[in-house]
Structures are given as structure tokens and as C-alpha cells.
Image: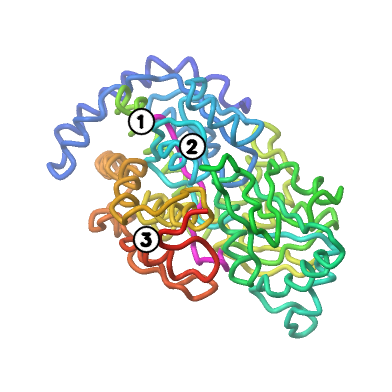
Amino acid sequence: MSSKHSGRQGRRTFLKKSVLAVASTLALSSATFVSSAYALGEPEKEDLNFGFIKLTDMAPLAIAYENGYFEDEGLYVKLEAQANWKVLLDRVIDGQLDGAHMLAGQPIAATMGYGTKSNIITPISMDLNGNAITVSNKTWEGMKPNVKMEGGKPVHPISASALKPVVESYKDEGKAFKMGMVFPVSTHNYELRYWLAAGGLHPGYYAPHKGDSSGTLEADVQLSVTPPPQMPATMEAGTIEGYCVGEPWNQQAVFKGIGVPVISDNSIQKNNPEKVFGLREDFYEKYPNTTIRVVKAMVRAAHWLDAENNKNRPAAVKILAQPNYVGADYKVIANSMTGTFEYEKGDKRSEPDFNVFFRYNATYPYYSDAIWYMTQMRRWGQISEHKPDTWYKDMAKKVYRPDIYVKAVEALIADGSMKKSDFPDVFNTDGYRGVQDDFMDGIPFDGSKPNEYIDSMKIGLKGQTKL
């Protein structure tokens, strides 16, 4: 914890009384939000432990803490960096952590029973975009002859079709071409697979019903798990030839001169959902006021991060650079967090939406986002057999909880922390984004028709197919 918070614990009694006073006042305010105000009495649990992985997209947690938004809600939060995504999830499931910065696929997979079975929910999405695919210098040199150039610089986005001759040369030599991603149900895994498949490269199948969790069946490119902070060193050692990861670990490769980012995930799908905040369903049932107040604080943090064209990002980078958060060099974090992204060394480009925390309804937990992840789970065999559309929709509603999010938003509006105009779509959405046609391969996604979408993919499991 930073030193400026050393006096905060002495404010507990005062804040506790303040929270109750505000709740009482709100209960008499606008009738539009009276039900939410009434629900927000004293937090049932004040002391909370939250986990995170050292990535820039944990920023809403750090900012909610550093700016005092958690304490404004009468919450006393401890933020703990975790070794990897599995440890983080296990500690939420067994109660060591009350909640955590999670991969969007983790609450879905846990609730489905893919891996450790546990009912995990997400009441808020933490960000959009924020990832990239990086390849080693050796691989990039092999790709460059297949990449269109203008003015001596690559034309982006770069298709995986440029990688295909490199992969084929490895096959000719009897070697496997290997890349890293951070977890089997991570956005990074699905984005890397999407990019590879769109370029004609098969990323492999999972077959959990056969006890095969490798994800490499029939693969042209073999993908394996590597914790985010270890990505650059693992590639530098030659264990993998590239990876998909969040920041700052793509920019770290550029700064170290060991690799080249070839595409950001915003070019794979524009404004794709990324991390979420996850907690056990029974935690919400036992501590509803606490949960809503956590969401309130995180929404305020997300709004601050994107306010006035990212004006607060330099201050956020300074916080994230602290060793107890991301712990990377300020310049490395700033390279992506402040509206730019560097590809080849010296090829720095404007990417104002590389990290989005609040714009474009980034914090709303859309059912259709959950369904897209499940379509990818089915496509690559993690869901081993056909499921009807209703199954996908029911599972999305079980895990993604916009009802909790809306209660938090109503309370923010009622207490004057934010305005209704800050949430133009929250009160008129059915939880589905509508048809999304902004994927790099041009294939539209309609969250209300998951099987139609799955069957439209050239590479991947379809229909009744089971390995």
C-alpha cells in the first residue's frame, strides 16, 4: 500500500456512519432510484481481499483503491498480486480471496465445470482491448516477405497468412512451431486461435471427454500456457516463437529488442471485451450491499481512467508502475496506456483505444460477450458436444450479472457520483450488443444465434461433430 493511505484505517468509524447517513438520505431522494438506495445500507462485509495478475488492465482495482473509491463505500480492500491465473481462481473458489481481476472465460468455465467446478459470477466488465500478438525477431524476419509494406513500414493489421510459410518451413524440418498464451480459457487463447484460423492455420482442438486438455490435436501451431510476466523471457529462450498477452509484456519485447508485435486485439475484433471482475455467487447472496458497492467503486475508477480523452492516464501509469501493482518501467506501461503502441522498434502508432476502461459501455457485462466466449470454447472442443442456443443463453445469464451492475449504476446516479448521461445504453439494453460485424475476417456474430455463428467458421468444430 502507498504511504498516503496510512491514516485511512482511523477513519473507519466515521466512514461507516457516513455510509449509513448517505444511504438514509438517498432513501428519501429521487423515486426513480429509491429501490437501489434502500438496498444500499451498511456493507455486510467491510474488509476484503482481492487478487490480480500484473497486467495493466487490473487498473480499475488499483485506481479504486488509490483514489479512495473503495473507502467512499465503506470498504477496506487489500489488493494481492497472484502467481498465475489458476492460483488466482483457486483462491477465489476456496475463499482466500473475496474476488479478483479475472479472464472473462474463467467465471464461465468454472460455472460450466470445465476445470474446477464453482459458481462464479461477474457483475462488471473491466476493460476492452489491451492485448496483442508478438512474434520473435527470427519469426518476424520470416514473415516480412509476406507482409505488404508502405513507405518501408508494414500495413496493419497483419494476417496470420504471413506466418503460414514460416510454420510450413518448421514442418518441413520436422519441428513444431510453438506459441504461448496465458490460460486455456483466456481471451488471449481465443484471440490467438481466431487470428491463426483466419490466416489458414489450425490452432488445435481440446478433447476433455477423452482426457486430452492439451489443445494441440490436429494443430499446425502448438499453443501452451505461459504466465504473462514470463512471456518475453520464454520467447527469448526459444521455448516459444511468439505469444498473445496483455500489456506491458508485448511492449517489453520491443524495449528488450527480442520481438515484434504484429497485431493488436482491437484489429482482430474492434473493442473486444477483455477482463472481468469475478466472485463467488454465494458471496453476492451473502453480501449483496458489499458487492454492489464494490461495483460502484470500480465503475468510478473506470470512468476516471477514460475521462476527458484519457487525461488521467499518465497518473494511472505512475500508479501501475509501482512494484505492488504491475511493477514495470513507466515508459513500457505508458507506451500502450497513453494512446500509442509500438510495433517494430521505432514504429510507434496512434492507438487511442488500445486500452478502454469505460468508453463504449466497457463496464457493462453483456450476455452476448459471454456467449461469444462459449462459441470459441465449442469451436475448439472445450465444449465437446453440440449444445442448443438456449443452453448458451441460460449459461450467460447465470454467469454475467447486469442486474447487479444496474443496481450499482442507479446508486451512483442517486448519490451524485455520476450522471445518467454517463450511461446512455444501460437502461435500454436487453444484454445483447446486436450483430457485430467488426471481426478481421468479416464474419458477423449475433449473440442470439450462437450455433449459426459456430457453423459459419471455416476451421473448427461444427454442428453435431464430436472428436
Q: Is residue 233 visible?
A: yes
Asked if the residue at tag 2 contacts the one at tag 1, i.e. Cβ–Cβ closer than 8 Å, the answer is no
Q: Which mark is residue 450?
A: 3
In the rendered structure, which segment of residues is drawn in magenta? Answer: 266-280
Q: Decide whether residue 273 is among the magenta residues.
A: yes
What's the residue type where badge 3 is placed? Pro
Label 1: which secondary element: helix
Q: Quadrant of the N terminus?
A: top right
| Residue position marked by numbered label 2 in the rendering | 64
Residue density around tag 2, few if under 14, some if 14–19, many if 20 or more, within 10 Å: many
| Residue position marked by numbered label 1 in the rendering | 281
Q: Quadrant of residue 142?
A: bottom right
> Residue shown at 42%/17% (left/top)?
12
Residue density around tag 1, few if under 14, some if 14–19, many if 20 or more, within 10 Å: some
> Residue shown at 38%/24% (left/top)?
74
Label 2: which secondary element: helix
What's the residue type where badge 1 is placed? Glu
Q: CA distance from mark 3 to mark 1?
A: 25 Å
> Residue shown at 24%/54% (left/top)?
427
Q: Quadrant of residue 445?
A: bottom left
Q: CA distance from mark 3 to mark 2?
A: 35 Å
Disc 1 versus disc 2: nearer the observer = 1
Q: Is residue 321 above or below residue 5?
A: below
Q: CA distance from mark 1 to mark 2?
A: 22 Å
Q: Is residue 138 above or below residue 399?
A: below
Q: Which mark is residue 205?
A: none
